[in-house]
Amino acid sequence: MKPSLSVFNPNGDMDLILRQSRAQRIQKATHGSSSSDGANEEPSGDTTVMEDQVELKQGPPVKFKNISSSVQTVEDLRNLGSRNELGQHIELRYRVSSAHLALASPVFKAMVDKSSATIDLSSRSKSGFIRYAEALLILLDVIHGHHKSVPQAMSLELLIELWRLIDSHKCHEAVEMFANHWVGSVVDKDKINGSSLKINMSRLYISWVFGQGEYFDLLARNILEFTAGSMQTNLPLPARILEALEHRREAIVNQVLDRIYGLLEELWSGECTRENCYARALGTLMKSMRSFGLEIPRSTNRPSNGKNILQLYDFTTRIKLRSNQKWDDCKWIMLNEHWDDCGLERLEKRMQRWEKEMSQIDICDGVRFRDFEVAQSTQEGNKSSHKRKGEASTITTNTRPLAASTGMKPSLLVFAPKGDTDIFLRKPNFRSHQKSLLQAADPNTGAEENDEHAEQELQDDQNEPQLPVVEEFNDVTA
């Protein structure tokens, strides 16, 4: 167990420092927050620049008050924003083990190699001070093996901040065992449909970077079905994913609109076997389209007219070409001694086929998690094949950052390349030992005599004081 919230190793040899200047705290209080918990509000990049400018104007370095001892719980950390310390410069110090940091992250290792006692992470906080401090707390608990202190659930904003830390410090392997619980805590399958596009796009990003394909596919389908406009997010979701989702949505929307406007054109220019048959149906369709919000003629600038896929699907199922008037006299007409069905009958049968076809459309075709994985793997393979002969093949981007190979062990039995201790596992060869005793017997005597001689030697050995036996072991590690 940890002795305190900010001490990850009592015998640690290094402090990680997080600082918040008075200017930052005053500015945060001036701008305010839309939520009761300031840790849930993510400041923009402009705010960070302004904070730096304000601090530069203050001139000489200032003293920061270490409040680590007063922060005993996570709730204490979250409540820092409401404390009466606006007139002070504050800092948090996390006592850590440099060996743990270096083993878990090559970025931390580089910092450890350059510093002997402290590492200042204040400049790396691009979001709220409190949220960054809490995310760092979770990451350090994972790295130092305090798994009981690692939360199984957290807010979406905190998980995004935690991922930024994981990705920027390249310690993906260390947190992999927690990914499923973390993502599951922010993606409630029963609440996906009722959430906003912004929240679901954030969830899609989290599902992608943590490699949770099931959640990714559910969210991708929801976004396709319920999004009427462009898909945008301020998170670094790969452009190929956004483009593929947008193209898929536009393709399905245009497919449905093509059928609706194609039906309109056929009623406009076609003829039925009875006078005014198509004219009445045309009026009914135009009235329905106008009421739904579809422009006549079709708009080229706004192909979807602010309608999502599910709305368009629903509209097509509610199209009625026949009004409440009686159409029985138009259903069958004898022409040239042949029965010829009414044109509306053909159109309605065609619409029934459309409805069946639309219900069978695979909305997520080409935009599932595995599709982007395969595409990324192919892209990386092509890059690797074009490298010059003899050049080291290094993949700098990964389809899932969590699955990155950064920090992998150099071999099966080497857990720390610069480790200072070896653990031995030895297995004596008893058959070889017994054989050597038999060979030590007189080779000129018979086998039975050799056996008796060996047994006698063993009994003599048991009666004599035991001396330490030095045996040679063959190291098979390599």
Image: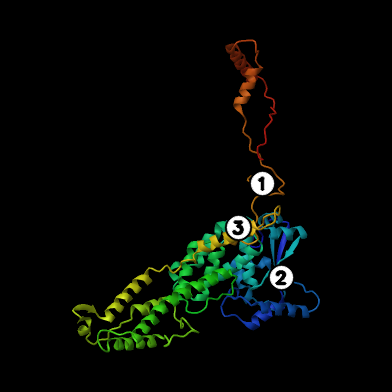
Residue under numbered circle 2: 123
First reached walking from the N terminus: tag 2 or tag 1: 2
Q: Which disc, if any, is residue 414?
A: 1
Q: CA separation, marks 3 and 1?
A: 28 Å
The amino acid at mark 3 is Gly
Q: Is residue 287 visible?
A: yes
**Residue 155: percent from left, percent from top:** 54, 69
Q: Earlier in the sequence, mark 3 or mark 1?
A: 3
Callout 2 crowding tier (Cα within 10 Å): few <14, some 14–19, many ≥20: few
Q: Which residue is mark 3?
A: 381
Q: Is there any visible trace of residue 115 in the rendered image? A: no
- In percent of width and height, residue 226 lies at 45, 75
Q: How far from the left and from the top, in percent, is residue 272?
A: 28, 84
Mark 2 vs mark 1, foreground winner is: 1
Provide residue 212's location: percent of width, then percent of height.
52, 62
Residue at 65% in and 15% down: 441
> Foreground: 189 or 259?
259
Q: Is residue 146 left or right of residue 357?
A: right
Location of the C terminus (image quadrant): top right
Which structural element holds mark 3? helix
Of badges 3 and 2, the one in the foreground is 3
In terms of secondary structure, where does tag 1 sit? loop
Marks 2 and 3: in contact by CB < 8 Å? Answer: no
Q: In the depicted view, which residue is nearer to us: 370 or 57? A: 370
Marks 3 and 1: CB-CB under 8 Å? no
| Neighbours of disc 3 within 10 Å: few (<14), some (14-19), many (20+) | few
**Which of the two residues, 343 or 418, is positioned nearer the viewer here?**
343
Mark 3–mark 2 distance (CA, rounded to whole Å): 36 Å
